[in-house]
């Protein structure tokens, strides 16, 4: 008999927002390095979003501790093979990258921009890490549902990417930037992330086999199938591909992806709650 | 208990008839030791319990059919020639001839010769009947010695009567009566009867599973007889393992906190039969056996009571002793019936919780609610202390004035506990009791001193003895020195005692070394002769408290004689003369215990020969095997032999009768119940019995205890770490019965009898199975009885209904114990 | 490091008296907790933050129609390779010089990663203290030359305490004897230091398969795959990254992006 860590909504939110932070950061950094001038909004929104969310993430994590005042105990200790230990450290490192990138994105100076691009390119590693380590953390527990398929990290990364990009799209849409080329590029990147996520999810379920029961047949199954697979992945993909003809506002797929991303963290965490 | 728990490890087969592992887990370690060695372990129990879990064979037996089972085993041993013939011929009364007028129950339709009606008779089926025992006696020769036939062939010899008595108890009959499949019974009979003979031994354990029946005493006799038949008494790995119900019940019995005996198992005098000391001693002292010394023990007891005031001239104060008006009037059950009828007005409950713990507890509570006053002394406020505000009772309707006095548990006082193997173990105070809490000794000596003050000016003859008694032990005015109490119990010289050469043997006041030194002239005093030797004077003149010695067993002394003190005389296995053959040699090398060493120094320098070995001989150490009575181990009996034929109130042999409430007619005879059973007629329908065949009460119920709780729960329900081990009060029910009444595991149910009903949770389990009795399915349920309305407030499950509200006020005719192991009930879904 | 200590729980000697469970609560001053209806005598259904020793009662009808009631006193296994210890991000969980695994209550911050990383579900979260709890192997007692309270109180020596090597040798003999006596399923669980998790410092003699006792047949260290998982994550990061690069890059196809 195994035991639940009693990780609930704070952790669901942390996993969700941490994924977005990581995804948004590396999306912005890639846009910064490989995109053009028209991607400036993507870059700025991405950096600031990741900075805001990483601060929130830190608060969520501290609040979830049994003894929040002892959060620094993790900083006095380092285990390179322990996802939670590196995760705690990387949260700080990522925050530093997000802060510097955000700050530099306000500057119009070219030299600053050059430095920012190099800085952010290095920072993408921390962005990828933040989006995926929570999956590795789960898959290195004793819970068969979390650990039997080895692709939880990959799945979280894909979801982090898709939700991070969706969050950027949503913010662009809300700030009236949806008409630009940048918006389209984000959507294109997101399309790729979603397809990738769908594939990893299929692989995840196949590898888990019967251990996937909490998702596929348990009380969370309706939420998983309808909320994540259909609403969160299939529908936005379909809309994204044929959306123009349906006259659905361009932001709808992004919102659905975010909902799907939240549901994914929710069902995976709560299946062992 | 004839043996010692440590010695169980030497058994080849152990048959527990009680729930040994659950109720005596510490003693049970020796069963596990025996099992590790390869011994077989049989558990006979209606329920599959934690004891069954570690047994090689579990034998399910319908509650109330123990005699049918033991009788079946005896019959099996006799029919298949498996009894230990040499032992039986030499050491028991099997060869003794009985009056030809005596007939067994086999020939008397379930009755022995001599049943007479003493009551009015008529329509009441439970009229008082008694046995006229005039034919229940040995044939004697001209010198008054019993006639014997060592070939065991005489039709009037005890062995032939035994064979006749149990001839009906066939394996088929055991299956029909007890519900034990024949194949299983034969398997068990073969295995257990295999312990007969020189090379093997077996032990049988029992507890309240045998005693709490209307034929409780005969249940135990049947067990003892089986052990005698197989030669299993007095030998290593043999014995009757009586497991007492709680820590000091053996001590309470030895010191006789009982109505019918005085300390050391001597009868409490009867008003009419024992008018003076001379007559008492004449009537109560047997002609043979060690009890011929009773006058020494009894007079020493009177000296311990009354001190210098007890003199030869005033019969050592015999007339100051209270006398019983009748032999059968003061048991627990008598007391509560009389209380209910208003005959008893005041009551002191010291460490007892009859509102929960006794039979027909509803009657007990109603009785206590009619008292003028009651004093409860306990370690928690018990249900008894709160009987005036019991659930459903308006306190205004109860006029009983209740005083509660807090008591000190064992860790807060010095004293001794005598455990199940007669082992007197000392315990020292670890902490002082808090506040006003007093030890029992402090309370009772203070009470006695106050009473003495109140009666100081009394001129009445009857008060003189009490006023003469001393309740001062040591110099502390309040707390008695318990080692001085122990010394008084042990016995001491009241004046200087010299031997015939004029040498001082005992100084005045010196503790006696052995009860053999007690005298009937007032020179010795002793509060309980069997305890003598527990404390002796050392070379420095200081008392050595042997109850406090702690030398564990070792290779030389497996019985651990250096660990505390076992009465009598630190003997660990009683009747151990029986471990050697007639010539005094061990029956076998493997099973040796004591033996006659002809080369050892004798009693006097000119003599040789002594009993030696691994235990203190329970025998005259210098009585040679070939001397008169040198071959008779059962020294406490007048005839010095183990008794197959042993007259009790309900027969010289145990005979199976159904419990007072039973699911079947008696298949062994037309006599349904014990013919001399004691049933109380209580007003207001407070003691109704379910008639035989009642459809309203179709299921057998047995009540019992759990490891996690203690008795009525006073020492466990108030302690969170114990109380939380069980979710709540529950009843164990088979899957078959649960299906029949449509209940699931954990559902609330109502269990009811004609006396009362309780609400509880159903624990549906494979560990109970229906019985097949005479071809019909009979369901049995089990209900533990630890719960009452008090407990830990934060743990609602520590409180529950009182199981004893279900049981009846009926009794065994010899000791008046209740029948709480087998009666009838109904079970209904939900709380009705 | 001192010689490794161990507890050997021989379930063939267990009578389910639960003295170990009570002794544990008493010595460790564990507070009251509400029992739960488990359908049998067992309470609780599993270890809790206030129950470190737990006697399991397992009813199992046998093929021959008889019943087996398996009794087992369960406890933290003090694994040689301990999932909880590996999971702990604060260093609160440590290995003592005797080889036992302990949680420093003054360091634990209640992240609960250890709770979910124990292959036996032993470690529990205490909501009152906000920290993770489990059997301490009576750390205070063993540092004062006293055995654990449970082993000390066990009336039938079902729980034995001593040096690991000696106990394991004893256990081997005992299991051989039991097999000889007809207990064909008797087996040791965790006695072998070359076995799963490097052996358990609280190991068991079982009379049936481990799964009958609610134990994993082959317990695995949760952290055994951390490298593989990380590499898979890196791989997917590269894929996602390449996808994003393709989407954002300016050179090549204008606006199309479907390179």
Image (cartoon, rainbow, N blue to C red):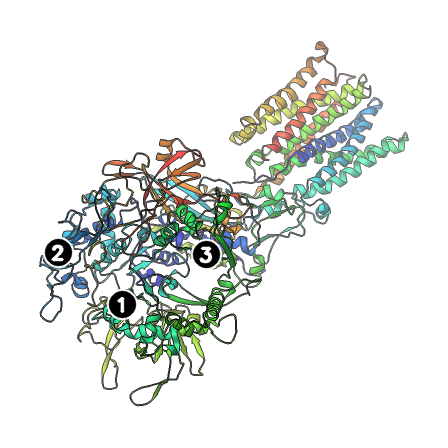
Is disc 3 on the same chain as disc 1? no
Left of B42 or right of it: where is A115? right
The relative height of residue B237 versus residue C69 in the rendered view (above or below) is below
Camera sees residue A262? yes
Dot 1 corresponds to which residue?
Answer: B274
Cβ atoms under marks 1 and 3 closer than 8 Å: no
Nearer to me, B89 or C61: B89
How crowded pointer 1 is (Cα within 10 Å; few <14, some 14-19, many 20+) is rated as some
Is disc 1 on the same chain as disc 2? yes
Nearer the observer: mark 1 or 3; the answer is 1
**SS state under label 1:** loop
Dot 3 corresponds to which residue?
Answer: C154
Camera sees residue B79? no
Image quadrant holding the C terminus of chain A, namely: top right
**SS state under label 3:** loop
Dot 2 corresponds to which residue?
Answer: B102
Cβ atoms under marks 2 and 1 closer than 8 Å: no
The part of the image, by quadrant, that contains residue A192 is top right
- Residue at the spot x=79%, y=20% of the render? A173
Nearer the observer: mark 2 or 1; the answer is 1
- How many numbered marks are there? 3
Image coordinates for residue B245, horizontal then vertical, percent: 38, 56
Image coordinates for residue B146, horizontal then vertical, percent: 13, 66
Q: Earlier in the sequence, mark 2 or mark 1?
A: 2
**SS state under label 2:** loop
Image coordinates for residue B118, horizontal then vertical, percent: 21, 52
Q: Which mark is residue B490?
A: none
């Amino acid at each position: 008999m195994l035991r639940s860590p009693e990780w609930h909504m704070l952790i669901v939110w942390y996993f969700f927002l941490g994924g977005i932070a990581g995804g948004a950061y590396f999306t912005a950094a890639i846009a910064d390095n490989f995109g053009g001038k028209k991607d400036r909004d993507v870059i700025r929104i991405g950096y600031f979003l990741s900075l805001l969310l990483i601060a929130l993430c830190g608060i969520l994590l501290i609040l979830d501790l049994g003894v929040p005042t002892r959060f620094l105990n993790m900083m006095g200790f380092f285990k390179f093979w322990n996802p939670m230990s590196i995760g705690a450290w990387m949260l700080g490192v990522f925050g530093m990258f997000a802060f510097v990138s955000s700050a530099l994105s306000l500057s119009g100076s070219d030299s600053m921009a050059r430095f920012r691009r190099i800085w952010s390119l290095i920072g993408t590693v921390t962005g990828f890490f933040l989006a995926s380590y929570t999956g590795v953390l789960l898959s290195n527990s004793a819970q068969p549902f979390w650990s039997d398929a080895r692709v939880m990290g990959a799945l979280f990364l894909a979801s982090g990417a898709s939700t991070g990009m969706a969050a950027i799209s949503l913010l662009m849409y809300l700030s009236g930037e949806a008409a630009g080329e940048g918006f389209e590029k984000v959507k294109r990147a997101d399309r790729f992330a979603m397809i990738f996520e769908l594939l990893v999810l299929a692989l995840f379920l196949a590898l888990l086999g019967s251990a996937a029961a909490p998702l596929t047949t348990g009380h969370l199954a309706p939420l998983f199938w309808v909320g994540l697979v259909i609403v969160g992945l299939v529908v936005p993909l379909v809309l994204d591909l044929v959306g123009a003809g349906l006259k659905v506002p361009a932001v709808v797929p992004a919102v659905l992806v975010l909902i799907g991303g939240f549901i994914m963290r929710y069902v995976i965490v709560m299946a062992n709650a | 208990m004839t043996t010692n728990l440590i010695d169980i490890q030497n058994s080849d087969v152990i048959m527990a008839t009680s729930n040994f592992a659950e109720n005596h887990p510490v003693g049970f370690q020796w069963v596990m030791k025996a099992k590790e060695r390869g011994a077989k372990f049989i558990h006979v129990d209606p329920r599959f319990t934690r004891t069954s879990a570690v047994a090689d064979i579990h034998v399910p037996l319908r509650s109330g059919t123990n005699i049918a089972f033991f009788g079946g085993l005896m019959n099996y041993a006799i029919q298949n020639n498996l009894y230990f013939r040499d032992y039986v011929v030499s050491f028991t009364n099997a060869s003794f001839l009985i009056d030809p007028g005596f007939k067994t129950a086999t020939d008397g339709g379930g009755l022995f010769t001599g049943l007479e009606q003493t009551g009015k008779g008529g329509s009441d089926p439970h009229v008082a009947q008694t046995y006229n025992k005039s034919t229940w006696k040995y044939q004697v020769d001209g010198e008054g010695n019993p006639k014997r036939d060592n070939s065991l062939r005489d039709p009037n010899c005890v062995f032939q009567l035994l064979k006749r008595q149990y001839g009906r108890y066939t394996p088929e009959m055991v299956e029909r009566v007890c519900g034990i499949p024949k194949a299983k019974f034969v398997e068990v009979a073969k295995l257990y009867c295999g312990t007969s003979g020189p090379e093997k031994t077996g032990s049988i354990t029992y507890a309240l599973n045998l005693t709490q029946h209307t034929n409780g005493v005969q249940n135990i006799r049947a067990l003892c007889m089986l052990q005698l038949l197989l030669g299993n008494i007095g030998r290593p790995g043999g014995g009757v393992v009586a497991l007492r119900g709680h820590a000091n019940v053996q001590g309470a019995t030895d010191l006789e906190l009982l109505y019918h005996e005085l300390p050391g198992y001597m009868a409490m005098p009867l008003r009419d039969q024992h008018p003076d000391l001379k007559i008492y001693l004449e009537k109560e002292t047997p002609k043979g056996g060690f009890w011929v010394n009773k006058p020494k023990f009894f007079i020493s007891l009177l000296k311990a009571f009354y001190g210098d005031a007890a003199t030869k001239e005033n019969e050592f104060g015999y007339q100051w002793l209270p006398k019983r008006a009748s032999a059968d009037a003061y048991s627990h059950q008598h007391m509560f019936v009389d209380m209910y009828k208003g005959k008893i007005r005041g009551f002191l409950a010291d460490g007892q919780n009859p509102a929960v713990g006794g039979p027909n507890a509803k009657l007990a509570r109603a009785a206590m609610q009619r008292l003028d006053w009651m004093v409860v002394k306990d370690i928690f406020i018990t249900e008894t202390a709160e009987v005036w505000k019991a659930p459903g009772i308006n306190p205004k309707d109860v006029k009983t004035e209740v005083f509660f006095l807090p008591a000190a548990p064992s860790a807060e006082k010095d004293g001794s506990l005598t455990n199940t193997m007669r082992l007197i173990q000392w315990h020292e105070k670890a902490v002082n009791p808090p506040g006003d809490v007093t030890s029992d000794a402090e309370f009772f000596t203070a009470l006695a001193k106050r009473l003495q003050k109140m009666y100081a000016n009394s001129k009445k003859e009857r008060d003189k003895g009490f006023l003469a008694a001393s309740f001062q032990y040591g110099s502390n005015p309040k707390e008695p020195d318990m080692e001085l109490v122990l010394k008084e119990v042990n016995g001491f010289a009241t004046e200087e005692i010299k031997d015939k050469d004029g040498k001082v043997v005992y100084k005045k006041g010196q503790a006696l070394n052995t009860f053999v030194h007690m005298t009937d002239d007032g020179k010795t005093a002793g509060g309980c002769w069997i305890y003598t030797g527990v404390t002796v004077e050392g070379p420095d003149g200081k008392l050595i408290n042997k109850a406090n010695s702690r030398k564990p067993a070792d290779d030389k002394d497996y019985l651990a004689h250096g660990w505390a003190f076992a009465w009598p005389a630190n003997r660990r296995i009683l009747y151990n003369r029986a471990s050697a053959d007639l010539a005094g040699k061990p029956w076998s090398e493997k099973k040796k215990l004591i033996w006659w060493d002809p080369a050892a120094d004798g009693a006097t320098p000119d003599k040789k020969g002594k009993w030696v070995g691994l235990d203190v001989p329970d025998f005259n150490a210098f009585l040679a095997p070939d001397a008169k009575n040198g071959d008779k181990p059962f020294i406490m009996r007048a005839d010095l032999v183990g008794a197959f034929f042993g007259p009790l109130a309900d027969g010289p042999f145990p005979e199976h009768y159904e419990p007072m409430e039973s699911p079947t007619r008696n298949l062994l005879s037309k006599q349904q119940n014990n013919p001399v059973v004691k049933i109380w007629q209580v007003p207001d329908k407070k003691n109704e019995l379910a008639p035989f065949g009642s459809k309203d009460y179709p299921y057998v119920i047995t009540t019992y205890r759990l490891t996690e709780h203690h008795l009525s729960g006073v020492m466990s329900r108030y302690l969170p770490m114990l109380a939380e081990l069980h979710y709540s009060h529950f009843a164990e029910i088979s899957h078959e019965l649960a299906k029949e009444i449509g209940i699931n595991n954990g559902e609330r149910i109502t269990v009811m009898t004609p006396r009362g009903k309780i609400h509880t949770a159903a624990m549906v389990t494979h560990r109970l199975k229906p019985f097949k009795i005479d071809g019909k399915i009979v369901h049995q349920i089990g209900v533990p009885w630890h719960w009452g309305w008090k407990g830990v407030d934060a743990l609602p499950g520590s409180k529950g209904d009182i199981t004893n509200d279900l049981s009846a006020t009926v009794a065994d005719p010899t000791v008046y114990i209740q029948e709480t192991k087998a009666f009838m009930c109904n079970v209904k879904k939900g709380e009705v | 490091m001192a010689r490794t200590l161990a507890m050997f729980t021989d379930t063939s000697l267990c009578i389910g008296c639960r003295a170990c469970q009570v002794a544990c609560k008493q010595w460790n001053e564990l507070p009251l907790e509400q029992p739960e209806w488990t359908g049998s005598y067992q309470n609780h259904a599993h270890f809790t933050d206030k129950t470190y020793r737990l006697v399991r009662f397992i009813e199992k009808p046998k093929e021959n129609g008889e019943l087996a009631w398996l009794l087992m006193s369960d406890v933290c296994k003090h694994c040689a390779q301990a999932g909880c210890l590996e999971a702990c991000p604060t260093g609160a969980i440590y290995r003592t010089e005797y080889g036992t695994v302990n949680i420093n209550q003054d360091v634990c911050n209640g992240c609960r990663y250890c709770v979910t990383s124990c292959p036996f579900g032993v470690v529990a979260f205490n909501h009152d203290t906000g920290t993770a709890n489990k059997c301490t192997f009576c750390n205070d007692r063993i540092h004062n030359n006293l055995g654990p309270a449970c082993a000390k109180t066990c009336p039938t020596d079902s729980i034995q305490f001593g040096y690991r090597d000696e106990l394991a040798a004893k256990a081997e003999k005992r299991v051989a004897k039991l097999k000889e006596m007809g207990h064909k399923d008797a087996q040791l669980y965790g006695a072998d230091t070359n076995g799963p998790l490097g052996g358990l410092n609280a190991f068991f003699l079982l009379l049936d398969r481990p799964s009958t006792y609610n134990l994993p047949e082959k317990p695995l260290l949760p952290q055994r795959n951390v490298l593989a998982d990380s590499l898979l994550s890196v791989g997917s990061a590269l894929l996602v990254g390449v996808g994003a690069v393709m989407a954002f890059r300016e050179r090549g196809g204008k606006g199309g992006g479907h390179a």
